[in-house]
């Protein structure tokens, strides 16, 4: 079991083996939430042990035990959960795709059961199937739509999920820190071919990105 747990924290679809700032924020939020859960569990068990010990000493006379259990039982989770809520709101605010001048805009369309990507090139629009090309170190605004049913665009090492809904365009901001090849998938059941509805993300350095834009549209 420990090996399975460790193995689930790495690999091409890991949400903890991050490759971009948005994914790092999400992974940090996960660790903070996990820490908060441990704090709550620790204090709850400690409060239970203290209450049982006090009850043994006081017998049938509750004394002040009930007051302290009630007070701490309300105050402790309130403080921890409020802190987690504030932190989650801060992280959520940072992941909102606000306009930036150097963002690359890509149109991603989910199909049964493949993805098409369309973006501007040096000599015209570039359309690829099941392969998304992006530059390293630059924000990418993915305009997500669907050609048929509901899909969900997800590159776990770059950021969170975003649904592709027929008749609607949703925008997801992603960014890769370094060149490489990443894996993406549809994260919403979309029919019998859902398990194979995956795609690759090729992250280029500056020279590779210029070459892709210059030659891919030809």
Image (cartoon, helix red, strand yellow):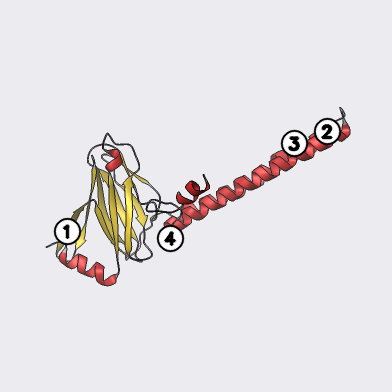
Q: Please state which of the two labelled residues, at mark 4 or mark 2, is closer to the viewer.
A: 2
Sequence-wise, which precedes: disc 4 or disc 1? Answer: 4
In which quarter of the view is residue 103 placed?
bottom left
Q: Calculate the distance from the C-alpha at mark 2 to the C-alpha at mark 1.
A: 74 Å
Packing grade of label 3 (10 A; few <14, some 14-19, many >=20) is few
Q: Which residue is at a point 29% across and 36% down the rendered structure image?
A: 190
Q: In this view, does 120 lie to the left or right of 25?
A: left
Q: Calculate the distance from the C-alpha at mark 1 to the C-alpha at mark 3.
A: 64 Å
Sequence-wise, which precedes: disc 2 or disc 3? Answer: 2
**Residue 78 in sight in this render:** no
Q: Which residue is at a point 28% across and 50% down the rendered structure image?
A: 199
What residue does disc 3 label? Answer: 70
What residue does disc 2 label? Answer: 55
Q: Which residue is at a point 33% across and 53% down the rendered structure image?
A: 183
Packing grade of label 2 (10 A; few <14, some 14-19, many >=20) is some
What residue does disc 1 label? Answer: 125
Q: Position of residue 60 (x, y in %)?
A: 86, 27
Report the residue that reaches farthest toward the bottom. 207
Packing grade of label 4 (10 A; few <14, some 14-19, many >=20) is many
Packing grade of label 1 (10 A; few <14, some 14-19, many >=20) is few
In which quarter of the view is residue 127 placed?
bottom left
Q: Please state which of the two labelled residues, at mark 2 or mark 3, is closer to the viewer.
A: 2
Q: Please state which of the two labelled residues, at mark 3 or mark 4, is closer to the viewer.
A: 4
CB-based contact (under 8 Å), mark 4 and mark 1: no
Identify the mark at residue 21; answer none if there is no mark: 4
Identify the mark at residue 133; answer none if there is no mark: none
For the residue pair 116 and 71, the one nearer the viewer reads as 116
For the residue pair 38 and 71, the one nearer the viewer reads as 38
């Amino acid at each position: 079991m420990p090996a399975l747990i460790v193995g689930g924290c790495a690999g091409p679809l890991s949400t903890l083996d991050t490759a971009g700032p948005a994914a790092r924020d999400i992974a940090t939020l996960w660790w903070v939430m996990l820490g908060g859960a441990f704090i709550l569990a620790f204090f709850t068990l400690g409060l239970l042990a203290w209450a049982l010990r006090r009850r043994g000493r006081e017998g049938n006379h509750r004394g002040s035990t009930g007051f302290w259990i009630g007070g701490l039982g309300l105050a402790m989770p309130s403080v921890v959960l409020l802190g987690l809520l504030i932190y989650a709101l801060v992280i959520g605010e940072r992941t909102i795709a606000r306009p930036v001048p150097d963002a690359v805009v890509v149109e991603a369309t989910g199909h049964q059961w493949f993805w098409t990507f369309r973006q501007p090139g040096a000599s015209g629009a570039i359309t690829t199937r099941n392969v998304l090309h992006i530059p390293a170190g630059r924000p990418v605004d993915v305009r997500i739509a669907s050609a048929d049913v509901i899909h969900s665009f997800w590159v776990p090492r770059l950021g969170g999920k975003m649904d592709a809904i027929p008749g609607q365009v949703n925008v997801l901001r992603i960014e890769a820190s370094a060149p490489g090849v990443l894996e993406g998938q549809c994260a919403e059941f979309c029919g019998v071919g859902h398990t194979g509805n995956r795609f690759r993300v090729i992250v280029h350095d500056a020279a590779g990105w210029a070459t892709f834009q210059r030659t891919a549209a030809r």
